[in-house]
Image (spheres, rainbow, N blue to C red):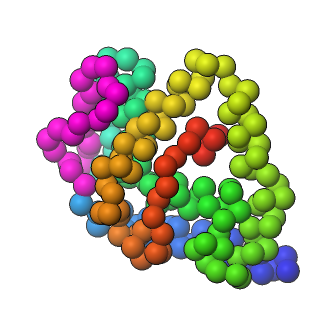
Amino acid sequence: MKTRGRWCFLLLGLSAVLLSGCAAMNSYKKEGSLPLPGLKERVTVLRDEKGMAYIYAGCAADALRALGFVEAQDRLFQMELTRLVAEGRVCELAGEKAKPLDVRMRTLGFLRNARKHTALLAESEKRFFQNYVDGINAYIETRKNTYPLEFKLAGIQPTPWTVADSL
């Protein structure tokens, strides 16, 4: 059983690496402007020749919101896979063979602990994380029914992000 769990975890990791390479094939907007709900001021995101994003914002809240949007734009599938593993929900993607991994992850209680620690955050810390999460969810909302290729290949769709998902 230990070996099977390791193989499932290894297979999932390799799949994440291979499918994240599909990100280069995604067609997201590279120039122009996009509305991002909740911004207080104008935010500029510039990308270099390798696609690295540079965020210029007038305040931390706007920078975090833009960061969440840009990270989701670049890595939403990887984020979703990580969440599935941490929550013990790999069976949704890989079937019954991933059950030992899911049982182990649920026993470790990453989701339970993340929710517990979210409740312990000071209000300023919650707002900090919530700005980032709002950026991720804004990206998910703008891409409804046109998610990146890796989601189509895996047969899954992203769900709204929470602060606990980021802890």
Look at the picture and state if 90 lies above or below 80.
below
- Identify which residue, 145 or 20, lies in the foreground: 145
Majority secondary structure of magenta residues: loop
- Identify which residue, 81 or 115, lies in the foreground: 115
Residue 10 visible, this angle: no
- Identify which residue, 37 or 167, lies in the foreground: 37
Look at the picture and state if 105 lies above or below 8.
above
- Identify which residue, 79 or 147, lies in the foreground: 147
Residue 107 in picture, x, y percent from top left = 84, 58
Residue 61 visible, this angle: yes
Residue 123 in picture, x, y percent from top left = 61, 19
Look at the picture and state if 82 lies above or below 18.
above
Quadrant the C terminus occupies = top right
Q: Residue at image x 48%, y 38%? A: 133
Residue 164 in picture, x, y percent from top left = 63, 41
Residue 146 in picture, x, y percent from top left = 30, 63
- Number of numbered discs on residues: 0
Q: Residue at image x 71%, y 30%? A: 119
43 falls in the magenta region: yes
Residues shaded magenta:
28-49
3 falls in the magenta region: no
Q: Residue at image x 44%, y 54%? A: 75
Q: Residue at image x 17%, y 38%? A: 33
